[in-house]
Image (cartoon, grey):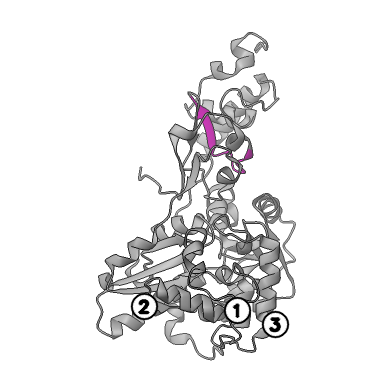
């Protein structure tokens, strides 16, 4: 089986097996074995919750460094729309873009252009997905649907994200100028670890290849050295509707879908996806789902408080009077459709129905003899997760401290 790459990693030397990550992982992807945390890659969705709660810095986000851009002849940066809210409302996007050029990039690509393209495509194609249509901006949400809710994959809007659209347009531009694909280095300034994983996955596609993801929190102090405290000239080439994608609810506003809801925070997202799976939200046209609190503005690799970041973004938007007019995108639309919903998904139980029934029965039999306290002493986050581990051969029933000590007997 091919090994999955994940941007959330673990430094074994720093881990003391405290179980905080174990108890806070929303998809139960972490176990504690021999006094150390173990991440089950097939379950991990790169939400970064373990990084947030680990008091010892054992969980880390893998990402690129600024030095990596020197390997390319042409260096283009795609800043996340969240970047512009990290320096206060007095610093205009133009000043931030200028600072990026001083760090060695040849071009700062305006991602708000790609956001406006994405908005127009969603307006046109939203009815092609099963209702309620689910946004595919957040890689963590896509991974969550694939691993935990495979029955609602048909609800995902099949299109590329603004980041991938940006990469496509950049490569077309520089290839037309005579540059070879390997000479073009495209880097995304990311607000979260999940985009590092996503970029690794899409790198196989030469047309939308992104060469790396640099954390905004890493590049922040370097940018500060080149940013003036104030810049009174507004960058008219930043789209106000594109900037809406920075926070929860902004995407729905940009698209103009009234019969919609916006959900942020991984636990809230899980509740809503469960409702979709159970058919409780069939009267909704579109759901904007973002794993981080307050959407991308709450990304783990940002500096600013997510709610203040939203305030700053809205302040910048109020100063802008520009939106890209996307009249005709038919010449590139065929390239912008994602096969995200078509690719093979990894089910939680075996695809074979008979095997699945046997597995569930075995799990239930084990659950019935467990104490049900979800104490975590076995190294699994819950009794249900432990039962699944036992059935899969990843744990022994004797790992349960209650059973091994004779505190609970199986009378069956």
Q: Is residue 279 visible?
A: yes
Residue that badge 3 annotates: 318
Coordinates of residue 24 in the picture (x, y in percent): 63, 40
Closer to us: mark 3 or mark 1?
A: 1
Label 2 to label 1: alpha-carbon separation: 23 Å
**Does the stretch in magenta take in 174?**
no
SS at mark 1? loop
Instruction: Specify which label sits upstream in the sequence, 2 or 1.
Output: 2
Residue that badge 1 annotates: 230
Range of magenta residues: 24-33
Q: Is residue 384 above or below residue 146?
A: above
Coordinates of residue 211 in the picture (x, y in percent): 36, 64
Tag 2: Cα neighbours inside 10 Å, few (<14), some, or many (≥20)? some
**Does the stretch in magenta take in 30?**
yes
Q: Nearer the viewer, residue 241 or 56?
A: 56
Instruction: Specify which label sits upstream in the sequence, 3 or 2.
Output: 2
Q: Is residue 285 visible?
A: no
Residue that badge 2 annotates: 106
Coordinates of residue 362 in the picture (x, y in percent): 57, 26
- Residue at x 45% of width, y 73% of height: 100
- Residue at x 63% of width, y 35% of height: 23
**Horizontal side of residue 123 vs 308, given as left or right:** left
SS at mark 3? helix
- Residue at x 51% of width, y 45% of height: 44
SS at mark 2? loop
Tag 1: Cα neighbours inside 10 Å, few (<14), some, or many (≥20)? few
């Amino acid at each position: 089986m091919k090994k999955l790459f994940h941007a959330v990693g673990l430094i074994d030397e720093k881990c003391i097996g405290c179980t905080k990550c174990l108890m806070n992982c929303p998809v139960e992807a972490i176990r504690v074995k021999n006094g150390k945390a173990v991440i089950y890659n097939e379950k991990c969705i790169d939400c970064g919750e373990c990084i947030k709660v680990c008091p010892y810095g054992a969980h880390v986000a893998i990402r690129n460094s600024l030095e990596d851009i020197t390997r390319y002849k042409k260096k283009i940066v795609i800043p996340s729309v969240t970047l512009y809210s990290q320096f206060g409302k007095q610093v205009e996007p133009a000043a931030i873009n200028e600072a990026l050029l001083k760090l060695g990039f040849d071009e700062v690509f305006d991602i708000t252009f790609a956001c406006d393209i994405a908005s127009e495509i969603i307006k046109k194609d939203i009815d092609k997905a099963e209702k309620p249509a689910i946004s595919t901006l957040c890689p963590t949400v896509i991974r969550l649907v694939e691993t935990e809710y495979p029955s609602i994959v048909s609800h995902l809007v099949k299109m590329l994200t603004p980041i991938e659209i940006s990469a496509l347009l950049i490569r077309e531009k520089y290839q037309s100028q005579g540059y070879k694909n390997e000479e073009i280095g495209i880097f995304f300034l990311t607000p979260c670890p999940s985009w590092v994983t996503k970029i690794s996955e899409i790198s196989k596609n030469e047309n939308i290849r992104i060469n790396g993801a640099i954390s905004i929190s890493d590049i922040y102090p370097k940018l500060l050295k080149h940013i003036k405290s104030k810049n009174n000239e507004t960058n008219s080439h930043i789209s106000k509707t594109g900037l809406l994608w920075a926070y929860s609810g902004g995407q729905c506003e940009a698209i103009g879908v009234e019969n919609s809801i916006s959900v942020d925070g991984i636990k809230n997202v899980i509740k809503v996806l469960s409702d979709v799976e159970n058919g409780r939200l069939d009267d909704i046209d579109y759901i904007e789902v973002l794993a981080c609190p307050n959407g991308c503005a709450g990304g783990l690799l940002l500096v600013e408080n997510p709610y203040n970041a939203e305030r700053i973004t809205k302040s910048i938007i109020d100063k802008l009077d520009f939106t890209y007019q996307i009249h005709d995108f038919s010449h590139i639309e065929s390239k912008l459709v994602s096969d995200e919903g078509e690719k093979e998904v990894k089910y939680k139980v075996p695809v074979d129905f008979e095997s699945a029934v046997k597995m569930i029965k075995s799990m239930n039999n084990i659950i019935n003899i467990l104490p049900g306290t979800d104490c975590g002493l076995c190294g699994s986050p819950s009794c249900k997760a432990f039962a699944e581990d036992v059935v899969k051969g990843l744990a022994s029933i004797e790992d349960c401290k209650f059973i091994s000590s004779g505190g609970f007997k199986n009378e069956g």
